[in-house]
Image (cartoon, rainbow, N blue to C red):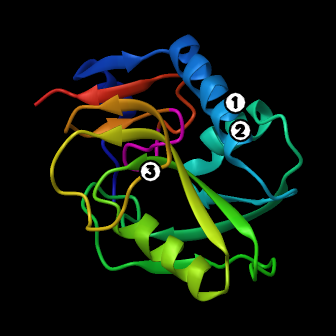
Amino acid sequence: MSRPPLASALSQSDLLFDRARLVAAIEAMGRAVARELEETPPIFLTVMNGGLIFGAALALAIPADLEFDYVHATRYRGGTQGNELLWLKQPRLNLVGRTVLLADDILDEGYTLRAIRDFCLDQGARRVLIAVLCQKRHGRTAPGVVADFVGVDVPDRYVFGFGMDYHEQGRNLPGIYALRD
């Protein structure tokens, strides 16, 4: 199966946020997260693969001790439409009685984040906070899913870059791009 070329997608996209704007938003989020955390250290749980770049930047922006783990659950599997949730890796740390900070690239419809949040609570987490680099502006978010910390809002278009992929490409782009309608 051949992938559409990233260069073609970039030529049909708009740059929404450059690296400087994203770094400033993430640094502000880090300060807000530090003010909210009461338990030391909370568990910083990165949602892979999309949350990798954002999670690393956010962790560096939080002036507090953190304990790290990750989870890998996906609905997209390289495509642009969500499917049934597939768990690839659950956290190894004991979540009982702990505060968990989920770090993910985007809150779109939120089904993946809701499932991960609910899993953490089912495992005994005392509290689960959600931090996302970006949040899509639309009315289709799963009931009960709200990000506690949001870097930037993006329009209801296909977005990629800074952790988010275009057919498994472009995660390492230093900005967020949106395909034109």
Please report the residue visible at 35 percent of the width from the left and 26 percent of the height from the top: 177
Quarter the C terminus occupies: top left
Residue found 45% across the figure and 65% down from its top:
113
Q: In the displayed structure, would residue 79 be above or below residue 10?
A: below
Residue annotated with mark 3: 147
Q: Residues within 10 Å of mark 3 (few under 14, many from 20)?
A: many
Label for residue 35? 2
Q: Are marks 1 and 2 in contact (CB under 8 Å)?
A: yes
Does 116 sit left or right of 139 as displayed? Answer: right
- Crowd band around label 1 with a 10 angstrom C-alpha radius: few (<14), some (14–19), many (20+): some
- Residue drawn at x 75%, y 41% is 59
Earlier along the polypeptide chain: callout 1 or callout 3? 1
Q: Amino acid at mark 2?
A: Arg
> In screen coordinates, is 157 left or right of 54?
left
Magenta-drawn segment: 162-169
Q: Is residue 158 magenta?
A: no
Query: Which quarter of the figure is the N terminus placed in?
Result: bottom left
Residue lying at the far left in this picture: please name it.
Answer: 181
Q: Give, as a three-letter code, the residue at label 3.
A: Ala
Viewer-proximal residue among 106 and 173: 106
User: Considering depth in this image, is 125 or 172 the residue closer to the camera?
Assistant: 125
Q: CA distance from mark 1 to mark 3?
A: 16 Å
Q: Amino acid at mark 1?
A: Arg
Q: Position of residue 78 (x, y in %)?
A: 39, 58
Q: Secondary structure at mark 1?
A: helix
- Residue 21 spot, x, y in % from top left: 51, 14
**Residue labelled with disc 1:** 31
